[in-house]
Amino acid sequence: MSIDVNNESGTEVDEQAILDIARYALARMRIHPLSELSVIVVDAGAMEQLHIQWMDLPGPTDVMSFPMDELRPPSKDEEEPPQGLLGDIVLCPEVAAKQGTEAPTQHSMDEELQLLTVHGVLHLLGYDHEEPDEKAEMFGLQAAIVDGWRAEKGLTGPSPAPTVS
């Protein structure tokens, strides 16, 4: 799995954890090990520009996903998943820090960025949360991936509650 994490935000973030949880999520979703992903961490100003340009919405957001090859998790019948370019995930630590402190289970900016990384991966794989049933599926899968990764890492305490809208 080729995953690049590029921090352009000026904020110190746990890049290794972002890389690790992205790798874990992709493996758990059975994405081809030669697929490629890019994660970019930007400041609020850059995120706001992207949010306006691509979503026509004001202000910065927490995470944006830009799919490339529209890869999907393989079905149970498929022996070998296809490989390709997953795309880009853009994260904003300033928004993540605020969301972490406002969440029902308060957590750190880095924990929020880990959650947002999984959220971005799922968007790249075609998951969405516009409809209630889609939201239940995506957020359930997101929680299972974050919980699994945290358990594998031996991290204690409650997992971050989904704060992504």
Image: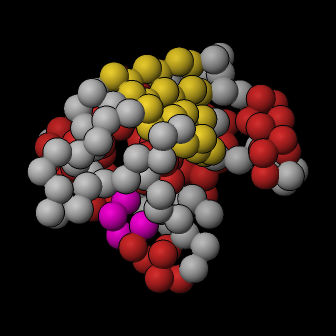
Against 81, residue 86 (above or below) is above
Q: Residue at x 48, y 47 (%)?
A: 70
Q: Which residues are magenta?
A: 138-142
> Residue 162's x, y, as percent?
48, 62
> Residue 126's x, y, as percent?
47, 58
Q: Nearer the viewer, residue 74 or 132?
A: 74
Q: Residue at x 53, y 83 (%)?
A: 132
Q: Nearer the viewer, residue 69 or 110?
A: 69
Q: Quadrant of the N terminus?
A: top left
> Residue 111's x, y, as percent?
42, 43
Q: Quadrant of the C terminus?
A: bottom right
Query: What coloring was used for the rendering?
Result: secondary structure
The answer to whether residue 97 of the structure is visible from this angle is no
Is most of the magenta stretch helix, strand or loop?
Answer: helix
Against 20, residue 80 (above or below) is below
Quarter of the figure with residue 43: top right
Q: Nearer the viewer, residue 42 or 82?
A: 82
Against 99, residue 13 (above or below) is above
> Residue 122's x, y, as percent?
43, 53
Q: Residue at x 38, y 33 (%)?
A: 84
Magenta segment: does it hold 135?
A: no
Q: Is residue 37 left or right of residue 53?
A: left
Quarter of the figure with residue 139: bottom left
Q: Is residue 144 left or right of residue 54?
A: left
Q: Residue at x 23, y 32 (%)?
A: 33
Quarter of the figure with residue 103: bottom right
Q: Is residue 122 left or right of residue 128?
A: left
